[in-house]
Amino acid sequence: MGDYAASIEACDTLLAMPDLPEPIRRQTVLDREFAVGRLVVAVPGPSAGRRGRERSTVTSVNEA
């Protein structure tokens, strides 16, 4: 519970299975998207002492 990186890894493992039944694949995609969203929220923003020097980084997620 709360280990979103491990959840994403588990979902990626499942999605790599070519014979994964379609209903399970669809749910796994939803579960992965949820974990990615939670992981992004959990990353702290820039500190207040760095005003004017913040950078925004966008990481793309490979769609399965």
Image: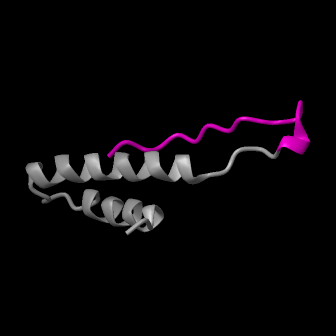
Residue 60 in the image, given as x and y percentages of width and height: 52, 40
User: Is residue 59 in the magenta section?
Assistant: yes
Image point 9% across, 55% down: which residue?
21
Q: Nearer the viewer, residue 40 or 8?
A: 40
Question: What's the coloring here?
Answer: one colour
Residue visible at 46% across and 50% down?
38
7 sits left or right of 48 in the view: left
- Residue 42 at x, y = what percent? 56, 53
| Rendered image quadrant of residue 12 | bottom left
Q: Is residue 58 above or below residue 33?
A: above
Task: Give the residue furthest to the front.
Answer: 48
Residue 23 located left or right of residue 58: left
Total marks placed: 0
- Span highlighted in magenta in the image: 48-64
**For residue 51, side relative to residue 4 (left or right):** right
* Residue at 89% over, 30% down: 52
Residue depicted at x 89% and y 41%: 50
Magenta: predominant secondary structure element?
Answer: loop
Query: Image height check: is 42 above or below 5?
Result: above
Residue 39 in the image: x percent, y percent? Answer: 50, 53
Image: 53 above or below 64: above
Q: Position of residue 11 (x, y in %)?
A: 31, 60
Q: Is residue 25 magenta?
A: no
Query: On the image, which quarter does residue 6 sit in?
Result: bottom left
Q: Which one is nearer the viewer's eye here, 64 or 6?
A: 6
Quarter of the N terminus within the rendering: bottom left
